[in-house]
């Protein structure tokens, strides 16, 4: 069994090389079969119960309003809720304890926490399915190994940055016949209490980077989950508290802060003067509020409108199959999902001929319908819609002006909260529609005058509204260079010519940066050095020898 120091050394190399590295296997068969068998049973034991395995104070109320998008039934789980002031006061009382720990001591309990969480991956899977509506495979990968790898990535990055400099040196400056000699001490000082605000669609994957980055940098953490998706991250917090206890540390260095939609406490937490660091995933409007708060260090992932350009392809069917799957995956409820698909009116170039614009639309529609109608793949790929608001958005978007709805195949054998995708054809001048985010299975096919107009619209959209991903099907090398250079100006990464079983939705820990922090999609990137460095400051002390 590897020591934590050996693990940290591996992480350092992985962060430097950016090659494939995964500490937690993404296939469920890599884990004990009994974990898989018992996961749903352990999840079910939480239903209708009080979640008392968390540490909580004496004065709490018990709340919970989660509803399964799969069964449409309430989970009836109650969580211990405290006031914002009480949570902050508790966190504040333990700041000094966490500050005094060395980076390796923090890494020890953080790595131990992930190993504990690993043993509950399959319980977390079912908690994720019944709060987000994800399929089993996505819930397992996103809330299990992929989330754990992202957390481990931040642990490795934080350890690297916290140990970048020598902390104690003797400094000597020659001054003629004498020298000035000073003893110098350099210390990374935590900024203060961190609040991590979770989202409803990826309650674990989006939260654990901020949680572990804060703990590694010495900041006590208050985790504020979305009211509709508490259970997955509550299990994570429970296991982190167990790791803290095992390390003989106060378990309340991390606390859960559940609330309800009708009585939120997010603003009370964020505006508290003792809260110094805020991680947020969610809507642009609330994200802008977070970024505008005075005296806070913020890490945001907000709404994004991701674009696709189809210019040319060596195998158009293969390209459209890949695109169709990425569109339907989790019904477009991913921050990396494509929304705008730009196709020039002259069509798409292939080795055999130029395929006309109407033909491309028909071919894409065929691939979408083929996936929807597949008895094993369709419903499982699309899964369930997490939010009633998304369902209403789909209904209200059918009669948009200057558009044409390309009817997709109806979903058969669907259970729970599902929706047939809404595919809208529009023209390039309809910018109000193109530059509006439609979260969920709503996709816009935009007919443009040329590839230059397609690229110009995609670039403008990224600059004004933000983009996390950008996919281009293009075989011309000069054009690929132009696309990269144009999108670099709006800090948007470009992916070319995907095919097979790798989709634009996927970002790999230890290799791909999730977000660039350079456009309106957010000011954070999982996990560059800034993601940890802004959580602490270096302070240098000197004494004359």
Image: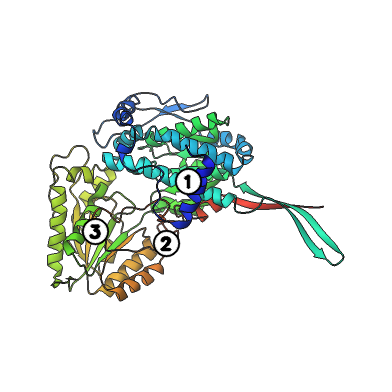
For the residues labelled 3 and 2, the Cα–Cα distance comes to 27 Å
Which of the 4 image quarters holds residue 247?
top right
Residue that mark 1 sits on = 210
Q: x%, y% of residue 386?
A: 29, 42
The residue labelled by disc 2 is 519
**In this orientation, does residue 392 appear?**
yes
Residue 116's disc is none
Give the mark toward the camera: 3 or 1. Answer: 3
Q: Residue at x 24, y 62 (%)?
A: 341
Residue 515 shown left or right of residue 397 in the figure: right
From the top left corner, tell me how far across and down residue 292 is, in percent.
Answer: 50, 54
Q: Residue 241: give x, y in percent of width and height.
A: 50, 32
Which is more N-terminal, label 2 or label 3?
3
The structure residue drawn at horizontal position 19% and vertical position 60%, both measured from the top left corner, is 318
Q: Nearer the viewer, residue 200 or 471?
A: 471
What is the secondary structure assignment of the residue under circle 2? loop
From the image, tell me which residue sits under label 3: 499
Q: Which dot, 3 or 2, sits closer to the camera? A: 3
Residue 388, picture quadrant: top left
Residue 509, image x and y in percent?
A: 40, 50
Q: Helix, strand or loop at disc 1?
A: helix
Asked whether the beta carbons under mark 2 and mark 1 sit within 8 Å of each other, the answer is no
Q: Marks 3 and 1: CB-CB under 8 Å?
A: no
Q: Earlier in the sequence, mark 3 or mark 1?
A: 1
The correct choice, above or below, for 454 with respect to 15 in the image is: below
Residue 266's place in the image compared with 444, above or below, is: above
Cα distance in 3D space between marks 2 and 1: 20 Å
Position above or below: 53 against 255: above
């Amino acid at each position: 069994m590897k020591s934590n120091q050996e693990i940290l050394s591996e992480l350092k190399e992985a962060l430097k090389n950016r090659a494939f590295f995964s500490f937690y296997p993404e296939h469920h068969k890599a884990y004990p079969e009994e974990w898989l068998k018992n996961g749903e049973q352990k999840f079910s034991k939480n239903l209708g119960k009080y979640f008392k395995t968390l540490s909580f104070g004496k004065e709490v109320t018990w709340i919970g309003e989660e509803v399964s998008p799969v069964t449409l039934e309430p989970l009836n789980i109650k969580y211990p809720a405290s006031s914002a002031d009480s949570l902050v006061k508790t966190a504040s009382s333990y700041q000094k304890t966490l500050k005094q720990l060395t980076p390796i001591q923090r890494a020890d309990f953080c790595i131990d926490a992930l190993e504990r969480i690993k043993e509950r991956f399959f319980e977390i899977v079912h908690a994720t399915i019944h709060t987000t509506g994800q399929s089993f495979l996505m819930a397992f990968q996103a809330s299990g190994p992929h989330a754990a790898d992202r957390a481990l990535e931040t642990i490795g990055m934080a350890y690297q940055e916290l140990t970048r400099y020598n902390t104690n040196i003797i400094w000597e400056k020659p001054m003629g016949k004498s020298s000035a000699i000073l003893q110098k001490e350099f210390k990374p000082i935590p900024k203060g209490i961190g609040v991590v605000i979770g989202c409803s669609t990826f309650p674990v994957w989006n939260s654990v980077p901020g949680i572990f980055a804060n703990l590694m940098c010495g900041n006590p953490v208050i985790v504020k989950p979305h009211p509709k998706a508490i259970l997955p991250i509550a299990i994570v917090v429970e296991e982190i508290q167990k790791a803290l206890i095992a390390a003989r540390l106060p378990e309340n260095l991390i606390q859960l802060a559940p609330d309800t939609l009708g009585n939120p406490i997010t603003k009370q937490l964020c505006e508290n003067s003792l809260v110094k660091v805020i991680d947020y995933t969610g809507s642009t409007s609330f994200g802008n509020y977070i970024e505008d708060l005075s005296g806070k260090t913020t890490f945001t992932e907000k709404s994004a409108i991701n674009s696709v350009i189809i210019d040319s392809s060596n195998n158009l069917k293969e390209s459209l199959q890949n695109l169709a799957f990425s569109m339907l995956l989790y019904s477009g409820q991913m921050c990396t999902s494509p929304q705008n698909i730009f196709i020039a009116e002259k069509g798409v170039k292939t080795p055999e001929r130029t395929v006309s614009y109407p033909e491309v639309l028909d071919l894409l529609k065929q691939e979408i319908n083929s996936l929807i109608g597949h008895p094993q793949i369709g419903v499982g790929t699309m899964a369930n819609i997490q939010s009633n608001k998304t369902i209403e958005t789909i209904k209200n978007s059918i009669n948009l002006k200057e558009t044409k709805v390309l009817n997709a195949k109806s979903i058969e054998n669907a259970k729970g909260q599902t929706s047939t995708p809404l595919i809208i054809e529009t023209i390039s001048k309809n910018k109000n529609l193109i530059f509006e985010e439609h979260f969920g299975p709503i996709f816009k096919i935009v007919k443009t005058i040329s590839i230059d107009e397609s690229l110009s619209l995609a670039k403008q959209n990224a600059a004004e509204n933000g983009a996390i991903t950008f996919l281009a099907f293009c075989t011309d090398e000069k054009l690929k260079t132009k696309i990269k250079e144009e999108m670099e100006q709006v800090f948007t990464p470009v992916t070319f010519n995907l095919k097979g079983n790798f989709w634009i939705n996927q970002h790999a820990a230890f290799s791909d940066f999730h977000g660039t922090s350079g456009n309106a999609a957010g000011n954070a990137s999982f996990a560059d050095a800034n993601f940890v460095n802004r959580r602490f400051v270096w302070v240098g002390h000197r004494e004359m020898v």
